[in-house]
């Protein structure tokens, strides 16, 4: 994840997983490994079965170039103050292999869809 994404997390590092923060500032973050590039972060994760990229926008864009699977949560609402967006998914390059739709309920203020894409 990028530095701003980490700093936006209300409780710091995500529990029960390896957290890697991409930054060139040299700052260390509690319970995290810091790397200066996505390539360096992927080297740290080379033994892991799956690696998840969770933003921000520049990290998403770079990750989309090398990913072979996408797990996307699409929230069916427009947020006025939203400032980071996932890049447009080129349907010529990706196929939806799973889709689950969820309505608004007591835990979720907006309907949403989980989508899994695999690279063609």
Image (tube, rainbow, N blue to C red):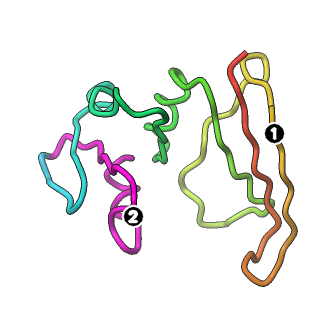
| Quarter of the image with the C terminus in it | top right
Residue 85 lies left or right of residue 115; in this view the side is: left
Q: Nearer the viewer, residue 112 or 116?
A: 116
Disc number placed over residue 15 in the picture, else none: 2
Residue at image x 79%, y 25%?
A: 95
Tell me where residue 87 sits by quadrant: top right
Residue count near mark 2 (Cα–Cα under 10 Å), binned few <14, some 14–19, many ≥20: few
Q: Is residue 20 magenta?
A: yes
Residue 83 lies left or right of residue 11; in this view the side is: right
Tell me where residue 78 sits by quadrant: bottom right
Residue count near mark 1 (Cα–Cα under 10 Å), binned few <14, some 14–19, many ≥20: few
Q: Nearer the viewer, residue 28 or 14?
A: 14
The x and y percentages for residue 62 are 46, 28
Image position of 2 with respect to 69: above or below? below
Residue range in magenta is 1-25
Image position of 58 with respect to 6: above or below? above
Disc 1 or 2, which lies upstream in sequence? 2
- Looking at the image, do the residues carrying marks 1 and 2 touch, with CB atoms under 8 Å apart? no
The x and y percentages for residue 54 are 49, 47
Tell me where residue 112 sits by quadrant: bottom right
Residue at image x 78%, y 63%?
A: 77
Residue at image x 65%, y 42%?
A: 71
Residue 1 lies left or right of residue 70; in this view the side is: left
Q: Nearer the viewer, residue 77 or 16?
A: 16
Residue corresponding to mark 1: 98
Residue at image x 78%, y 16%?
A: 92
Determine the residue located farthest toward the bottom in the rendered image.
106
Q: Nearer the viewer, residue 50 or 6?
A: 50
* Marks 1/2: CA–CA distance: 26 Å
> Please, what secondary structure does the residue beneath circle 1 have?
strand
The x and y percentages for residue 64 are 55, 28
Q: Is residue 7 magenta?
A: yes
């Amino acid at each position: 994840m990028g530095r701003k994404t980490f700093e936006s997390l209300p409780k710091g590092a995500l529990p029960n997983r390896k957290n890697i923060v991409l930054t060139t500032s040299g700052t260390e973050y509690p319970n995290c490994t810091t790397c200066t590039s996505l390539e360096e972060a992927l080297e740290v994760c080379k033994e892991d079965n799956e690696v998840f990229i969770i933003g921000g926008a520049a990290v998403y864009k770079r990750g989309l170039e090398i990913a072979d699977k996408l797990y996307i949560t699409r929230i069916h609402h427009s947020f006025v103050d939203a400032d980071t967006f996932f890049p447009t998914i080129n349907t010529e390059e990706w196929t939806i292999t799973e889709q689950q739709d969820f309505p608004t309920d007591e835990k979720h203020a907006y309907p949403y869809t989980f989508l899994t894409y695999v690279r063609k």
